[in-house]
Image: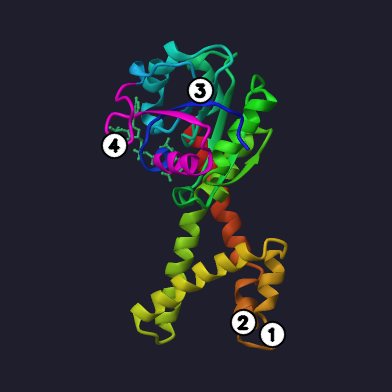
């Protein structure tokens, strides 16, 4: 369910386009106006030509052009209009400094699988966002995957380090597993196919068993004294994968804080 709403989507590139597809598929009663200078989906090229009223403005432009985009949408804003932004790294304080502290603002960190409806989005609101607006934001982001809320915005850097950057870690896992297979004597093409399909299949298996935790899924493929156990003794050793992942996420979290300034 989605509260009946009029949405202005500003920016219809990779992520905005994925959101638009998800909304059109799921919400027949949503009125959407798209502003984008180049997208074939656009109703208007310039935000200034968008005719309201709107209940919510969704900002899906690059962070580099956010300040100028906020200046463009400012004339369209009304006091209770929700502004939802999916731009990486921009804080709620950044939006408040451009459009006013009393504007309801939701900051979202999505990730790239949202482009195929399998995203993980984490949302954070300022104090002016109502319960109905939170429900609207949840519905809008659930159209492209899972949506979770956090109260403490300072956790966004850790969120970015886990689910925002996370797809890159999984793709690197494919590369590493394929390289290890090649080192074990497999032809490189075959090794890459095995590694890639193993990650894909494991992800879908985890998805198909939502009530089974990751440790149990792992144990299900680990017979005592077998081959998997021999490998896991390396991966789960003191300075194994958990230690490596902790250091990687820590580095990404620190970098996120630096970039936010
Ligand atoms: N892609 C991801 O996986 C991902 C993941 C997490 C977060 N995000 C966030 O999502 C946002 C969008 O990323 P993206 O990858 O979808 O970017 P993108 O493909 O470049 O799309 C942005 C679109 O916005 C348009 N645009 C620029 N200025 C505009 C304006 N003033 N009014 C209306 N439209 C305008 C761009 O047109 P031009 O090409 O003409 O500039 C482009 O079509 C970014 O802030 C990014 O941080 C993306």
**Comparing marks 3 and 4, which lies closer to the viewer?**
4
* Mark 2 or 3, nearer chain start: 3
Look at mark 4 in the image and give the residue it sits on: 40
Which type of secondary structure does the marked residue at label 1 adopt?
loop
The residue indicated by pointer 1 is: 223
- Residue drawn at 60 percent across, 72 percent down: 235
Give yes or no for contact between labels 2 and 1 (Cβ–Cβ under 8 Å).
yes
Q: Which mark is residue 94?
A: 3
Cα distance, mark 2 to mark 1?
7 Å
Look at discs 1 and 4 and give the one toward the viewer: 4
Q: Is residue 223 magenta?
A: no
Q: Which residues are magenta?
A: 17-46
Mark 1 or mark 4, earlier in chain:
4
Ligand 1 location (quadrant)? top left
Give the CA separation, mark 1 to mark 4. Answer: 54 Å
Residue 172 percent location from the top left of the image: 45, 63
Q: Is mark 3 within 8 Å of ligand 1?
A: no
99 or 154, nearer to the observer? 99
| Vertical relation: 80 (above or below) 172 | above
Earlier along the polypeptide chain: callout 2 or callout 4? 4
Q: How far apart are the alpha carbons under marks 2 and 4?
A: 50 Å
């Amino acid at each position: 369910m989605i509260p009946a709403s009029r949405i202005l989507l500003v920016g219809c590139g990779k992520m905005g386009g994925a959101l638009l597809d998800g909304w059109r598929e799921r919400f027949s009663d949503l009125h959407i106006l798209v502003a984008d200078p180049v997208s074939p989906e656009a109703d208007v090229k310039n935000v200034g030509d968008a005719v309201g009223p709107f209940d919510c403005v969704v900002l899906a432009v690059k962070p580099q052009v956010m300040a100028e985009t906020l200046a463009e949408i400012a004339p369209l804003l009304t006091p209770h209009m929700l502004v939802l932004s999916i731009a990486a790294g921009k804080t709620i304080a950044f939006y408040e400094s451009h459009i006013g502290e009393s504007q309801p603002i939701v900051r979202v960190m999505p990730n790239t699988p949202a482009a195929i409806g399998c995203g993980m989005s984490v949302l954070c609101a300022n104090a002016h966002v109502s319960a109905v607006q939170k429900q609207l934001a949840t519905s809008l982001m659930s159209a492209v995957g899972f949506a979770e809320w956090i109260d403490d915005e300072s956790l966004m850097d850790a969120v970015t380090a886990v689910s925002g950057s996370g797809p890159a870690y999984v793709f690197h896992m494919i590369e590493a597993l394929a390289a290890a297979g090649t080192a074990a004597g497999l032809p490189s093409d075959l090794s890459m196919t095995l590694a890639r399909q193993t990650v894909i299949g494991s992800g879908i298996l985890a998805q198909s068993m939502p009530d089974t935790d990751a440790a149990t899924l792992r144990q299900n493929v680990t017979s005592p004294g077998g081959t998997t156990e021999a490998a896991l003794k390396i991966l789960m050793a003191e300075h194994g994968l958990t230690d490596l992942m902790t250091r990687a996420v820590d580095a990404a979290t620190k970098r996120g804080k630096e970039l936010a300034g």
